[in-house]
Image (cartoon, rainbow, N blue to C red):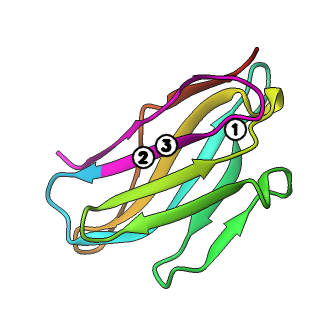
C-alpha cells in the first residue's frame, strides 16, 4: 500500500518552531512533487508550501520568510520547517505527494495537528 504519513505536530508557544515530516512508503519509484496544506478551525484547506521535482518551491504569502519546505529524496521524505509560529498557524497540516509508481499517483496523509498557543 502506497501512503504518506505526517509527523511532528504538537503544541508550541507563539514564536516557537516545529518541523513536520512527511514520509512516503510502499511500492513507488520516487516523489515527483509534494506540498503541505492546512485547514484551520472553520476554514477551508489551503496550500502552505510545495516543492517540485526540480526543487522549485512556492509558499503562501502568510508563511513566506517563516516556513521552509525541503525534501530528502534518499529518505522519500518531505519536511516543513516552521519558525516564528503564530496563533493563526493553528491547523491540521496535511501532506500531499505525487508519487511515481510508474505513472503518477496522488496521495494524501491523514494530517497532523499543530496548535500555537500560550
Of pointers 1 and 3, the one earlier in the residue sequence: 3
CB atoms of marks 2 and 1 within 8 Å: no
Q: Which residue is denoted by mark 3 in the rendering?
A: 20
Above or below, 46 against 14 in this view is: below
CB atoms of marks 1 and 3 within 8 Å: no
**Side (left or right) of 26 relative to 46:** left
**Side (left or right) of 69 relative to 75:** right
CB atoms of marks 2 and 3 within 8 Å: yes
- Residue 98 image-quadrant placement: bottom left
Q: Position of residue 103 (x, y in %)?
A: 29, 74
Q: Which residues are magenta?
A: 1-23
In terms of depth relative to the viewer, which is nearer, 37 or 81?
Answer: 81
Q: Which residue is denoted by mark 2 in the rendering?
A: 21
Q: Callout 2: few (<14), some (14-19), or many (20+) C-alpha neighbours within 10 Å?
A: many
Mark 2 to mark 3 CA distance (whole Å): 4 Å
Magenta stretch, main secondary structure, is: strand
Q: Callout 3: few (<14), some (14-19), or many (20+) C-alpha neighbours within 10 Å?
A: many
Amino acid at each position: 500500500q502506497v501512503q504518506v504519513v505526517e509527523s511532528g505536530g504538537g503544541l508550541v508557544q507563539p514564536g516557537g518552531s516545529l518541523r513536520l515530516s512527511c514520509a512516503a512508503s510502499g511500492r513507488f519509484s520516487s516523489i515527483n512533487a509534494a506540498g503541505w496544506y492546512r485547514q484551520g478551525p472553520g476554514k477551508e484547506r489551503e496550500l502552505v508550501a510545495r516543492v517540485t521535482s526540480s526543487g522549485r518551491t512556492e509558499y503562501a504569502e502568510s508563511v513566506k520568510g517563516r516556513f521552509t519546505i525541503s525534501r530528502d529524496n534518499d529518505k522519500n521524505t518531505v519536511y516543513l520547517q516552521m519558525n516564528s509560529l503564530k496563533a493563526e498557524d493553528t491547523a491540521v497540516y496535511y501532506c500531499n505527494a505525487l508519487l511515481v509508481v510508474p505513472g503518477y499517483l496522488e496521495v494524501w496523509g491523514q494530517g497532523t495537528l499543530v496548535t500555537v498557543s500560550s
